[in-house]
Structure formats: C-alpha cells, structure tokens
Amino acid sequence: MKTSYFNQIDGLRFVAIILVLIDHFAHFIGKKFHAGYYGVDLFFVISGFLITNILLQQNGSFKLNYLNFIGRRILRIFPIYYMMIFLMYLCNYQPVHDYLIYFLTFTYNYAHALYLIPINALSHFWSLAVEEQFYILWPIFILTFKSKPKLIYTIILMIIIICNIQLFFNIFPSISRYNYVGLFPQANALSTGALGVFLFKNKRVQDSYIMKSALFEYFVLIFLLLILLIPNHDKFILCPFISLYFVLKCSQVGFKSLRINNFLSNKTIIYIGAISYGIYVYHLPLDYFLTKYIFNPLFWDKINFENLGKLRVLELHPWLIKFPVYSILSFLLAHFSYKFIEKPILTLKDKYFRY
C-alpha cells in the first residue's frame, strides 16, 4: 500500500473524532444527524481494514504472529485506558466503583446495556470494549485461514450479512438489547472494513467509475448526510459501506476533489487524527470535571441570563462555548499524553513485538 494511505487514513480519523466531539460537546447539533454514531462507525471500519491488512501480511508461525499482534495492541490501548480508569477510581467516581470489573475486562459494553447504566464520563468506553473483543478474536480467524483468502472473504461476507439482518430485523430477540453495543452485531462495521482489504487488491474496483469520479464523491457525501438526518434503520446497513468507500479512496489514489484531498492531507489534520485515540479516551472525563468544578460553578451559573433580554436563549446553549473550548483542551491533553506517555511506550512495540 502507498505511504500516502497512512496519512489520509489519519485524516479520516480526524473526521471521526470531530463527529464524536460534536455529539458530546455540542449535542444540540450532533443529535440531529447522529454525529457520534457515525464517528464510531467510521473508527470501526478503519480498524477492521487496518488490522486485517496487517494480519494478512504476516509470515511465520500462528503463535508468534498472534502474540506479536496482541502485544502491540496492548501497548497501544492499555496504558491510557487503564490510567483513566485508575484516576476516576481515585476520584471516587461512582460508576467506576459500581462496574469496575466490567471496565477492567473490556466488557463494559454489555454491562451498559444489561444494567441500563445512565450516560456517564466513561460511557464511551463501550466502543473500546467492542474493539478489544474484536482484536482478541479476529487474529485467530485471519491467521488460521490466511492461506485461504477466498474462504476468509466468504466468511467475512457472511458475518456482514448476518449482522445486518440482526440490526434490521432483530432475528435474535434474546440479544436485541446488545444490538448497538455488543460485538455482535457491531462486528458489521469492523468486518466491512476487513472486506475492504480484498476490494483494495481488486483491479476492477480500483479502475471503477465510483473510485475515479469526483462527482460520485460529492454524491456519497450528500447521501451520507441525508441518511444521517432522516431517522431510519437503513443507516445501520449503509453507513459502514460509505465509510469503506472513504477508506478505499484514502488507501488507493486519494480523493479526486482537490479540497477533500488537501483537507485529509493537511499536517495538522493528520496529527490530530493520529492522536485521536487519546482524544477519545480523555474527552468525556474532561467534560465531566470541567463542567462540574469550573464551567458551571465559576462561570455559567454566575451569569444573570434574565438581564440579557432576547439573548436569554443562550442559557439553553452552553455548547456554543463548550464545543470549541473543550475540543481544544481535549486536543492539548491528548497531545501531551501522546508525547510523554503513549509515544515512549509505543517504541517498545518493535523492541518486543516486531512483525
């Protein structure tokens, strides 16, 4: 794959994390087009695409490749994940104390649905649980059958079809409560990303009109916005394929639209995308502490909105300030985390778990 592929994939990660921040910091806007939902969906497709590509390229024994993959994932995911849980525990944050075993074992996604846990500062960890469960199981499948790509391709298609049937028709009512947080059927988006590895290598796909047309790029963007704005179940099926289209564009020749291409290739956009994991981990705890101890008591609650006349409506829209300020602070926190915590740890990947 071309080196530019990595750059624009990070550009897509920037889009995904911004959508999540819009949903959580500017929910008034985000809820209107399911911003957070699509941001996580895009993250899932990117993950499925990248890890499947990595696994299919490995040589050597199953045991060595599996341990290397898991070791590298642990060094990437675990440090700041468990650090945040530890800090919230020390701060006596009640949801962590109540559901600690689920947070520690990356099973919070099931606890979230089973116990109907209210939205809290670590609610977003459900998606990290889904990814970690996928990281444990997926390499077993891919490494076992990597010499039989047609079989892998067929099984991936079957997984996508079954997951979509569950999302759309709920054919397994006993697990319906986990439809939107469980590994099944959320493996839909992750498997769709995996499917992209095979499409990437298909010459007919690379040379197709949909991959080379600038007009089609704008059509897909408009179509995506429409299905996100209109409440329907179709988006659960269509969004992963739209995300896959974006991933394939980034991993092949880039976008034909110069504006989109330049945006996804911008160094600042790429860097924010590269540290998006840290942004994702930190942003809701940051929101919780800033709102509870600084924003509300020291600023927002002291404003006499009754004296503002028609501008009193601003009382209902604190997101106008929260979104830009909290987003920038999330970027800064993730930047320092990456520089002083994550990056030094990531240097151990090639020392102990070299592919």
Image (cartoon, rainbow, N blue to C red):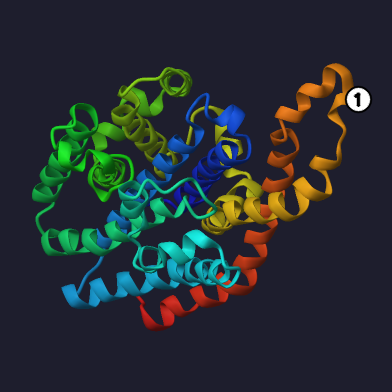
Closer to the camera in the image, 82 or 178: 178
The residue positioned 55% from the left and 55% from the top of the image is 274
- From this view, report whether residue 318 is shown above or below residue 150: above
Residue 160 on image: x %, y %: 20, 39
Identity of the amino acid at label 1? Asn
Q: Is residue 119 left or right of residue 309?
A: left
Instruction: Using the image, determine if residue 273 lies above or below residue 217.
Output: below
Who's the residue at 49% across and 38% down the image?
A: 36
- Secondary element at image label 1: helix
Residue 114 position within the rendered picture, expressed as x and y whole percent measured from the top left: 30, 49
Q: Position of residue 250 (x, y in %)?
A: 44, 41
Closer-to-camera residue (259/253): 259
Q: Is residue 259 visible?
A: no
- Name the residue located 27 percent from the left edge and 33 percent from the top edge: 205
Q: Is residue 293 left or right of residue 107?
A: right
Percent x, y of residue 9: 47, 47
- Disc 1 target residue: 307
